[in-house]
Image: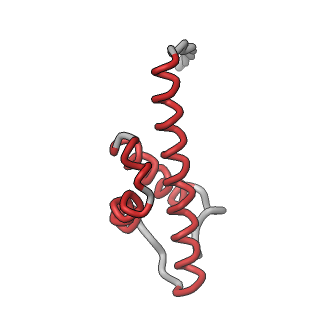
């Protein structure tokens, strides 16, 4: 018999940490949605499906186009790219077929 435990933690960030976290979450959300928009548009127009490396190649271009993305950690932005790719691979409703 396997017993699973759940641990819940609550964060109480100070104002500086709260600002930092909001920047990270907001920029990651922006990158995810922007890459989703671009990939869907390209699929509809040209029928090209993207993979993880195509998303990853677009990230530096997004940083040039939207300079505010340089405020966020690059690892956070790369993780949102990986999350987008994982969403297409695991959820059949998201696949561009």
Tell me the quarter of the picture where residue 74 sits: top left
The residue under the point 52% across, 87% down is: 46
Tell me the quarter of the picture where residue 64 sits: bottom left
The C terminus appears in which quarter of the rendering? bottom right
- Name the side, left or right, on which 63 lies relative to 13: left
In-front residue for pair 64/2: 64
The residue under the point 49% across, 46% down is: 28
Q: Position of residue 73 (x, y in %)?
A: 36, 40
The residue under the point 50% across, 59% down is: 89
In-front residue for pair 60/51: 60
Q: How many marks?
A: 0
Q: Which residue is most to the bottom?
A: 46
Q: Position of residue 55 (x, y in %)?
A: 41, 63
Q: Which residue is most to the front?
A: 67
The residue under the point 55% across, 47% down is: 29
In-front residue for pair 64/40: 64
Q: Is residue 33 above or below residue 20?
A: below
Residue 96 seen from this side: yes
Q: Is residue 9 above or below residue 49?
A: above
Q: Is residue 92 above or below residue 77?
A: below
Q: How is the image coloured?
A: secondary structure
Residue 7 seen from this side: no
Q: Position of residue 50 (x, y in %)?
A: 45, 71
In-front residue for pair 16/85: 16
Q: Position of residue 66 (x, y in %)?
A: 44, 58
The N terminus appears in which quarter of the rendering? top right
């Amino acid at each position: 018999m396997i017993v699973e435990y759940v641990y819940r933690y609550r964060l109480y960030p100070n104002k500086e940490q709260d600002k930092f976290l909001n920047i990270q979450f907001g920029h990651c959300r922006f990158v995810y949605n922007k890459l989703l928009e671009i990939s869907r548009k390209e699929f509809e127009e040209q029928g090209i499906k993207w993979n993880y490396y195509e998303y990853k190649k677009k990230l530096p271009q997004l940083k040039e186009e939207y300079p505010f993305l340089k405020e966020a950690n690059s690892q956070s932005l790369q993780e949102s790219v990986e999350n987008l790719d994982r969403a297409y691979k695991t959820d059949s409703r998201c696949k561009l077929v």
